[in-house]
Amino acid sequence: MPSDISVSKTPSSLNSGGFCEDDECLMDGDTASPEEISNLSGAVSMLLQGIGENPDREGLLKTPERVARSMRFLTRGYRQNPEELLKKAVFTESYDEMVLVRDIDIFSMCEHHLLPFFGKAHVAYIPDGKIVGLSKIGRVVEVFARRLQVQERLTQQIRDAIQDVLNPKGVAVVIEAKHLCMVMRGVEKLNSVTTTSAMSGEFISSPSTRSEFLRLIGA
Ligand SMILES: Nc1nc2c(ncn2[C@@H]2O[C@H](COP(=O)(O)OP(=O)(O)OP(=O)(O)O)[C@@H](O)[C@H]2O)c(=O)[nH]1
Ligand SMILES: [Zn+2]
């Protein structure tokens, strides 16, 4: 097992819900203890042996720890609280037209094969007295994307978090993504793109609002 493991945060920075409480961790930090990295590295080492590799050959010596840290990064959304993130930048404003953040890059991992899916998210809401800092929309997308996912659930979780914190007149989320489990293995459909949507409030009740949103994202 690697002996030179440094950690950016101790488990004591986690609250009772398992989420990080301080700002750095809420945004980007990791909370891995040496023991967690060590356990994960051990599992990767077994995986290497399982595919017939020799984890002790030179090129693979540091791979278990690298993969452990990489997996922690790719799943860091489990340790971040999306609602707390959004609440950090909620402002009172009378603006009541649609706010749309388009073309947000997403990288997630399918829970079936642990392979990436990636693409764009488009997120809109219609404020009802409260707006949110624009970057927080991208951050909330990131929190849910950095977990093992299916695209449908990812889409709904983003909608629900924004709806719950802002209580706006409506939220709309569309995700367009390419799944590597359908591209580099399995059915091997290189150009397939999956689109999912989740909406609430006026995006459901008002066909013109929904159409405006779909037109603005070029759907
Ligand atoms: N609905 C949905 N399905 C997904 C997502 N990511 C991967 N999948 C699918 O999950 C399914 C798992 O099906 P299984 O038959 O259990 O697994 P498999 O034998 O590896 O399937 P193939 O990919 O068809 O080879 C596959 O159809 C994948 O395409 C996602 O985000 N949403
Ligand atoms: Zn998959």
Image: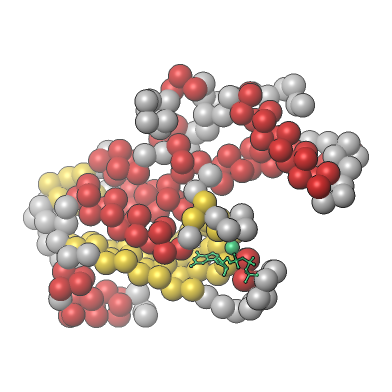
Residue 101 visible in the displayed image: no
Q: How many marks?
A: 0
What's the colour scheme?
secondary structure
| Residue found 46% across the figure and 41% down from its top | 78
Q: Quadrant of the N terminus?
A: top right
In the image, residue 175 sits, relative to residue 8, either above or below, namely below
Of residues 34 and 219, the one drawn nearer to the viewer in this rendering: 34
- The answer to whether 75 appears left or right of 20 in the picture is right
Toward which corner of the image does residue 170 lie, by quadrant?
Answer: bottom left
| Residue found 63% across the figure and 66% down from its top | 181
Percent from the top left, x then y, of residue 208?
A: 17, 80
- The answer to whether 121 appears left or right of 123 in the picture is right
In the image, residue 101 sits, relative to residue 182, either above or below, namely above
Q: Quadrant of the C terminus?
A: bottom left
- The answer to whether 145 appears left or right of 187 in the picture is left
Residue 142 visible in the displayed image: yes
